[in-house]
């Protein structure tokens, strides 16, 4: 697994400008889901569950909320949309479906109003 993509997003903790390609975004999502599942299991073992979510899982969610929003905004920038479109996620069901479709689209080749194509620079190995 490419943990470097996850670390790269964390290095850009609150960077909302620029662009992120699909690999960066989806690897961050994948690793975040795996970590959340692991913490949920650990919460269950330790008995730190409360109101349906565990203490460790909640702390992790708080820690990655800003980088999650930042990489989501940069991913939308890659397809030429404003990061504010993430607010669609507040619309039940339809909003998240639209966002998933956009996040899965191929980015614009070359530069756009949000910066250079992320594939043009060095990539984590």
Image (cartoon, rainbow, N blue to C red):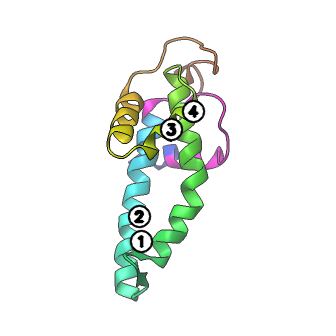
**Mark 4 and mark 2: span between their CA atoms?**
24 Å
Disc 4 to disc 3: CB gap under 8 Å: yes
- Residue 39 is tagged as 1
Q: Tag 4: Cα neighbours inside 10 Å, few (<14), some, or many (≥20)? A: some
Disc 1 to disc 2: CB gap under 8 Å: yes
**Mark 4 and mark 3: span between their CA atoms?**
6 Å
Q: Which residues are magenta?
A: 6-22
Residue ID for mark 2:
36
Q: Give the number of callouts.
A: 4
Q: Earlier in the sequence, mark 4 or mark 1?
A: 1
Q: Earlier in the sequence, mark 4 or mark 2?
A: 2
In the image, taking residue 57 as reference, residue 82 lies left or right, namely right
Tag in front: 3 or 1: 3
Q: Secondary structure at mark 2?
A: helix
Picture quarter containing residue 71?
top right
- Residue 86 is tagged as 3
Residue under the point 41% across and 43% down: 91
**Mark 3 and mark 1: span between their CA atoms?**
26 Å
In the image, taking residue 51 as reference, residue 21 lies left or right, namely right
């Amino acid at each position: 697994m490419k943990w470097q993509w996850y670390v790269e997003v964390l290095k850009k903790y609150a960077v909302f400008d620029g662009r992120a390609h699909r690999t960066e975004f989806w690897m961050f999502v994948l690793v975040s889901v795996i970590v959340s599942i692991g913490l949920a299991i650990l919460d269950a073992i330790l008995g730190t569950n409360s109101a349906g979510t565990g203490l460790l899982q909640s702390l992790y969610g708080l820690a990655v909320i800003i980088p999650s929003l930042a990489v989501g905004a940069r991913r939308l920038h890659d397809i030429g949309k404003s990061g504010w479109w993430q607010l669609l996620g507040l619309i039940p069901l339809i909003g998240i479906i639209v966002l998933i479709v956009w996040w899965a689209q191929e980015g614009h080749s070359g530069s756009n109003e949000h910066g250079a194509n992320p594939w043009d620079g060095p990539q984590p190995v």
